[in-house]
Amino acid sequence: VLHDAVVLEDTVRANLFAGDAPDAVLWRALEAVEMDGRIREAGGLDSWVRQDRFSLGEAQRINLARAWLSPQPVVLLDEPTEHLDEAQGERIL
């Protein structure tokens, strides 16, 4: 997860790179990074994402949800909370 968070112009679901993971698992990942409410407001897992639709902190949290869902045993983080306030960064990590 890089500090310059990138989201793809695609659905939230596609941005999570989770294949055919059940919706409940995707929502749990979004909840873990405090993005579930924002994604519900935006229209849910199948809502369209554009880079300018989310703040840098929100894009970074989508990237963290992607990492949370990753099957890899180790995930490298490069300033994963740079665009988050200190308290939120501590809660998420």
Image (tube, helix red, strand yellow):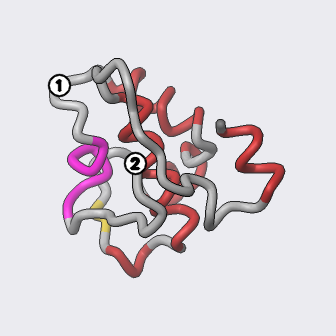
Residue in the foreground of this view, choosing between 82 and 52: 82
At horizontal 48% and vertical 32% (from top left) the residue drawn is 29
Q: Tell me which residue sits at (38%, 25%) in the image.
A: 74
Tell me the SS state at disc 2: loop
Mark drawn on residue 20: 1
Callout 2, which amino acid?
Gly
Task: Residue lying at the far left in this picture: please name it.
Answer: 19
Quarter of the image with the C terminus in it:
top right
Describe residue 61's horizontal placement relative to residue 89 as left or right: left
Say which residue label 2 marks: 44
Viewer-nearest of discs 2 and 1: 1
**In the displayed structure image, the side of residue 81 where residue 87 appears, left or right:** right
Q: Is residue 23 above or below residue 90?
A: above
> How far across and down, in percent of the image, does residue 63 sit?
41, 50
**Which span is picked out in magenta?**
10-16
Decide: is 73 above or below 34.
above
The x and y percentages for residue 88 are 75, 50
Among the 4 quarters of the image, the one containing residue 67: top left
Residue type highlighted by circle 1: Asp
Q: Outermost residue toward the bottom?
A: 52
Distance from Cα at disc 2 to Cα at disc 1: 16 Å
How packed is label 1: few (under 14 Cα within 10 Å), some, or many (20 or more)? few
Q: Describe residue 68's horizontal placement relative to residue 51 as left or right.
A: right
Residue at 59 percent of width and 33 percent of height: 32
Q: Residues within 10 Å of mark 2 (few under 14, many from 20)?
A: some
Question: Of the residues under marks 2 and 1, which one precedes in the sequence?
Answer: 1
Q: Secondary structure at mark 1?
A: loop
Position of residue 15 in the picture relative to residue 90 (left or right): left
